Image: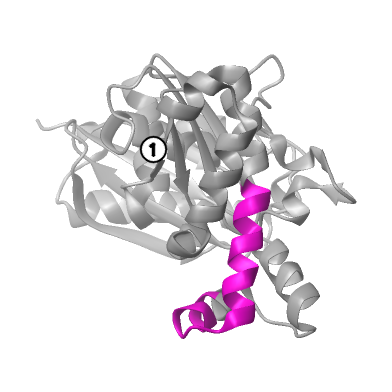
Amino acid sequence: MRKIIIGIDLGGTKIMTGAINMAGKVLGTPVKVPTESHLPKEIILKKITDAIEKIISNLTLTINDVAGIGIGTTGPLDIETGVILECPQLPTMQFFPLRDAVQTYFGIPVFINNDANCLIFGECIFGAATNKKTVVGFTLGTGIGCGIVIDEKILNGTTSTAGEIWTSPYKSGIIEDYISGTGVSKIYQSISGNDRSSLEIYQMAENGDVDALQTWAVFGTHLAVPLAWSINILDPEVVVLGGSITTAYKFFKDTMEVNLRKRICPVPAKKTKVELAQLGDYGGFIGAACLVFKN
């Protein structure tokens, strides 16, 4: 009998499900389906269970070959009870006991955590931060997420909200107003007077557009602020950056680094590294699967 682990990355837009072996190798082809978060919770749950069953079937295995299931979901959530709380991205699943529902369906251990925590956790086990004792990671995409891992254990905090920095006051609003896909668009609009998506602004920067390049430079200046907060508080060995916005890393790296080093203590200013996540599009479900390893 060969044991595998199933990981699920549940977001408001998509559900990505995949299997890994005990060495972290992705097995077979992951299953990606739209969440359609407006649908009833029972239908979203069925999307999850159907994807798990498809993964197992495609590998010509049975549920007895699965050591456990890990779920990384957008939050907030109660990690102890496995219940999704007041989550705007999953409106029909609010106060739904997702962990117990999946565990009851399959009859094997299920573990759940915040999706940003999972992504960074996966990088600690199999990616850019392997063998590091103290790691802080940020996911940059629709919003900003943060995960903290110490001695290969996720720091959840007293109320399961450690790392939820997105609401932190910053300038005229909160930090997510500036560090997010929407934030990139707002910066571009303030510079050019035009509306563009963050993807379009990235593509324009690739073509040398001056306003787009300036937008990313300003974005890097803003990003340096929460990175500095985390380094000054936790003194990590490495800060990992993941998420879709890191595709544009080369355009904001320099201003981020310059402003970051100005804001942190002298010793970490010389030593602390910022690294890009290595697990790519599969990082979410790989990190979720890693919850099984550590439980």
| First to last magenta residue range | 202-223
Measured as percent of width and height from the top left, residue 165 is found at 70, 36
Secondary element under disc 1, as helix, strand or loop, is: helix
The quarter of the displayed image where residue 219 is located: bottom right
Side (left or right) of 277 relative to 215: left
Q: Nearer the viewer, residue 269 or 202?
A: 269
Side (left or right) of 196 relative to 256: right
Q: Nearer the viewer, residue 213 or 129?
A: 213
Q: Is residue 106 above or below residue 28?
A: above
Q: Is residue 271 above or below residue 285?
A: above
Farthest-out residue, left: 1
Inspect this view and state whether residue 62 appears.
yes
User: Which amino acid is tagged 1?
Assistant: Gly
Q: Is residue 113 above or below residue 251?
A: above
The quarter of the displayed image where residue 255 is located: bottom right
Query: What colour scheme governs how the chains and residues are painted in the rendered image of this protein?
Result: one colour
User: Which residue bears the numbered disc 1?
Assistant: 287
Circle 1 residues within 10 Å: few <14, some 14–19, many ≥20: many
